[in-house]
Amino acid sequence: MTGTTTSSNRVLVIFPGALGDLICVLPALRTLLRRYPGCVMELMARAELADFAVGRMGIARGHSIDRREVGLLFSSDADVAAQAAGFFGAFAAIHSFFGFDNQRMRELLPKACRGAVFFHPFRPAAEGHIAAAYLREVTAGHATFNPEPAAAKLDLLTADLDLARRLADAHGVGPGRFVLLMPGSGSPAKNWPAANYLQLAGELSRYCPVLTVLGPAENNLQATFSRLVTIVNPPLGALAGLARISAAFVGNDSGVSHLAAAAGARGVVIFGPTDPARWRPLGAVSVVRRMPLRDLCWRDVAQALEALPKCAE
């Protein structure tokens, strides 16, 4: 961040969601940046997501949503607004997707901020893609939403791509040549079975290298994928970089699939119980949907990979 930051040029967005939610709110963040020219935008979110957003999503500074001042906004004590003002009073405007239905927070945050405060629902119930719903929230419903890849495109850091290339090289795969498999998600019900991923990997490896990424939620799968080239728990920036330099990716309806698509990768995203019209990643992705998920054959996913359009930088 450059220049001097004062209370007159700082805007805060409070967002409680997970990784996929954060990627989906990116078009709304870009719109808010244009709404406040000359201001710096800061994000309060889960600590690891707030840190990740800095420099990659138009965010100048990140803050943990677990800060003490946030808890004060739910307190019944008489002087908590004054205490919370030590932090929130520094902002010219706050857009909060947290506390929309909490009367106490809606009462205290405007007192603590001293500037304009706007409350928006987290995961608005409006029809259509969730990113469109977020965008309508911050534009009072007047924006035209065009779900193109650029609408949710991350600004990857040079360090992200450098680390991704080092990781790929260390695991014997070259940029632009490997398929990235991401077999996990935050919900086991949304996961294509590991056995299906293994079968797909075996078939794809006849023609190109395959690199598998497992996150914290997939610790129980490390033994299952031990015979594949696997990276465990890479930083989010490095994972986005790996997706960018891959030939393509395959993932479930998950936050990392949103991340990969937002990084500019093309890929196939596997859906089961959830609605891709609302939750599909924005970008150069093909959606394959089947219920039950175990009935989706590796050949269908391989064919979807083969049919992907070529990357366009």
Image (cartoon, grey):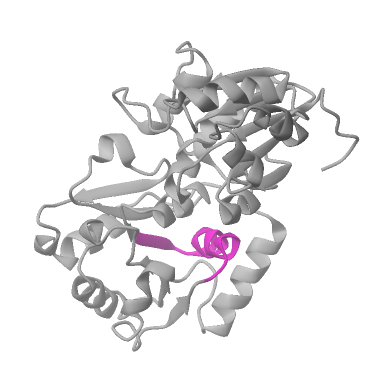
Q: Is residue 281 magenta?
A: no
Q: Where residue 303 sits: x, y (%)?
A: 22, 59
- Asked if residue 93 shows in the view, the reply is no
Residue 146, relative to residue 253: is it above or below?
A: above
Name, please, the residue furthest toward the right: 4
Region in magenta? 234-250
How many tags in the picture?
0
Residue in the picture at 37% in, 55% down: 267
Q: Residue at x 47, y 39 (%)?
A: 149
The answer to whether 25 is drawn above or below residue 173 in the figure is above
232 vs 248: above or below: below
The one of 180 and 131 positioned closer to us in this rendering: 131
Task: Please report the residue visible at 65 percent of the width from the left and 40 percent of the height from the top.
Answer: 69
Pick whichever, 61 or 211, lies toward us: 61
Residue at 72% x, 34% y: name it: 83
Q: In the rendered image, is residue 295 in sight?
A: yes
Q: Going by the image, does 297 lie left or right of 262? A: left
Location of residue 115 (image quadrant): top right
Q: Position of residue 166 (x, y in %)?
A: 63, 76
Please state the horizontal and vertical placement of residue 121, each as a whole percent of the image. 43, 26
Q: Residue furthest front?
A: 78
Residue in front for this viewpoint, 72 or 250: 72
Q: Nearer the viewer, residue 302 or 189?
A: 189
Q: In the image, 206: left or right of 163?
A: left
Residue 248 magenta-highlighted? yes
Residue at the bottom extreme? Answer: 227
Q: Which quarter of the image is occupied by the N terminus?
A: top right
Q: Dividing the picture into quarters, in which one does residue 270 lie? A: bottom left
Q: Is residue 290 above or below residue 207?
A: above
Q: Position of residue 261 (x, y in %)?
A: 45, 49
